[in-house]
Amino acid sequence: MSQPKSKLSRRTLFAGAATVGAAAAAVTLIPSAVPDLDAQKTQALNPPPERGGGYQLTEHVKRYYKTTLI
């Protein structure tokens, strides 16, 4: 009994694996390339703060500033 010769070479196998990997990477990057239109709509609908700026000095911000001191 002789085994049939496989026409699949190592080079073909690695080329196929690389193609599948590149396709998988492209599929994962495509959704991030499309802008989030719902987020843009909600930002456009929110009115600006009445007393200017939206910055608030909270405890979290104070802790962050403490970590930046040398």
Image: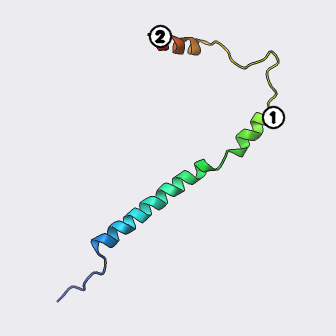
Placement of 39 over or under 15, stated as above or below: above
Please give the label number shown on residue 18: none
Instruction: Farthest residue to the bottom: give it.
Output: 1
Instruction: Quickly name the residue at label 2.
Output: 69
Residue at 34% across / 72% down in the picture?
A: 12
Give percent across and percent down for residue 31.
59, 51
Give percent across and percent down for residue 53.
74, 19
Left or right of 65 on screen, residue 46: right
Residue at 47% across / 10% down in the picture?
A: 69
Q: Secondary structure at mark 1?
A: helix
Amino acid found under the numbered disc labelled 2: Leu
Please rate how many residues cluster around mark 1, counting C-alpha atoms within 10 Å: few if below 14, some from 14 to 19, many from 20: few
Amino acid found under the numbered disc labelled 1: Leu
Q: Quadrant of the C terminus?
A: top left
Between disc 1 and disc 2, the foreground one is 2
Instruction: Quickly name the residue at label 1.
Output: 45
Which mark is first along the chain, 2 or 1?
A: 1
Q: Nearer the viewer, residue 39 or 22?
A: 22
Residue at 61% across / 49% down in the picture?
A: 33
Give percent across and percent down for residue 36.
68, 44
